[in-house]
Amino acid sequence: MLLGVQYHDFLNPQSIIKGGFQYMEIPYSVNIKKGLLQYKQEAADYELKVSGLVCELQDLTEDKLIELIEACRGCQGHYIVLSTMNCEAGVLEKIIANCAMKLADYKVPIFIENGCRGNDISGYFYNAYSDVSDLISIIDYCKSFCKELTMGICYNIGYANLLEKNISSQLRQCGEYLCMVHGNDNDGRRNDKQMPYTFTKGRGDLTTDWYHIIRELIHLQFHGWFVFDTAGLFGRCPERLHTYFIRLLHAIAVEWEKQYTFAERVLAIPGKKLILFGAGQMLKDYMRVFGEKYPPYFAVDNGPDRWNTEQMGVSIKNPQEILSVPEDERNVVICCMYYDAVGAQLRKMGVAYEEFHDRYFV
């Protein structure tokens, strides 16, 4: 994925680069517009790049769209996102229909974002841009006026959560139209714009199902832009903490990228014998997802009652059997929920290992 953080007046660009990101996304408001060159220079000073610009669709006109595209090109941005929060239907279609010929000369992709209407007090409700099917229809209609126009969907996780959407299903419906994701978290009632994994419900269940969201992006082989639009986080915490929170966001992104590359990075290693540590439900999950392409040499388990048995055609052995495989030939992967305890056990045995997290794949 291509990663970035959305910039705001209260967020120091230096915090973004110190936090590990190379790209910042700029909301194109009146104040930003007046100082756009200044922000471009600030980004260059900190070796940051502008990923793209975000603009409210309800404020857009034909002239503003052209101005926005030229500003994006001037910043060497890669895209424009049109936010549809509290926007009436038909706005973009009219604009594109009237200036399609002008747009044919521009090569800046335009992504339309899912949205809703309402606020934190009255609640949030569907609008003309809440469903993926409606976004696809709008894109197809606009492209009928200008086939050279590059358009796609920017899917905002937080906005979908406000409407209690099945986000995994919505991402799947996007298909090839999905070009970008805006990532933020909320409690399902207020547009908090916090970092992922912030909110839980019941007995610790996540309000936003980030595991299955990443699973769906992996299945889609999504390699577009993922930008954290967490203005609520940076607007509420002290400035001296911004860099540390951005580092945490970067760590989240690194964790997701590890899952993206899990099969190629961990399983597809030539000349290695794959050994799974764990013979419970997670072994079954592994076999359903990866078993056919990457079958294990054998599995081990700490339960003596499982030794010398089979699970889904895989032999289960004593963990000490790992040492019977030469170090340069073995590839050990923890395949149970007790990652810390098993990891400590393997380190004590002098065995290197990786981890299979089934929640990202099942």
Image (cartoon, helix red, strand yellow):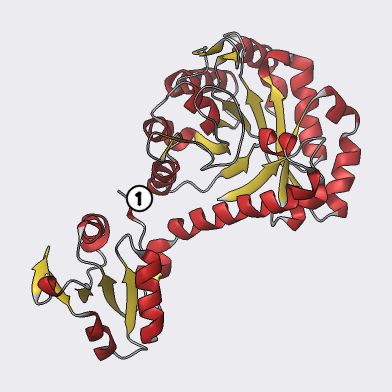
Residue at image coords 70%, 30%:
54
Residue at the far front in the pictured view: 203
Residue at the far left in the pictured view: 309
Residue 110 x/y as whole percent: 63, 30
The residue nearer to you, when weighing 344 against 355, is: 344
Is 341 situated above or below 37? below
The residue nearer to you, when weighing 341 against 11, is: 341
- Based on the displayed image, in which of its 4 quarters is residue 115 positioned? top right
Residue 93 x/y as whole percent: 60, 13
Residue receiving disc 1: 359
Residue at image coords 27%, 88%:
325
Q: Residues within 10 Å of mark 1 (few under 14, many from 20)?
A: few
Residue 223 shown left or right of residue 42 in the figure: left
Residue 89 shown left or right of residue 62 in the figure: left
- Based on the displayed image, in which of its 4 quarters is residue 332 positioned? bottom left
Residue 244 x/y as whole percent: 70, 53
Is 74 situated above or below 280? above
- Based on the displayed image, in which of its 4 quarters is residue 25 positioned? top right
Q: SS of the residue at dot 1?
A: helix
Residue 271 seen from this side: no
Residue 137 shown left or right of residue 286 in the figure: right
Q: What amino acid is labelled 1 in the image?
A: Arg
- The number of numbered discs placed on residues in the rendered structure image is 1
The residue nearer to you, when weighing 159 against 43, is: 159
Residue at image coords 48%, 33%:
177
Residue 185 seen from this side: yes
The residue nearer to you, when weighing 362 against 318, is: 318
Residue at image coords 81%, 37%:
10
Residue 120 x/y as whole percent: 60, 17
Residue 128 shown left or right of residue 308 in the figure: right
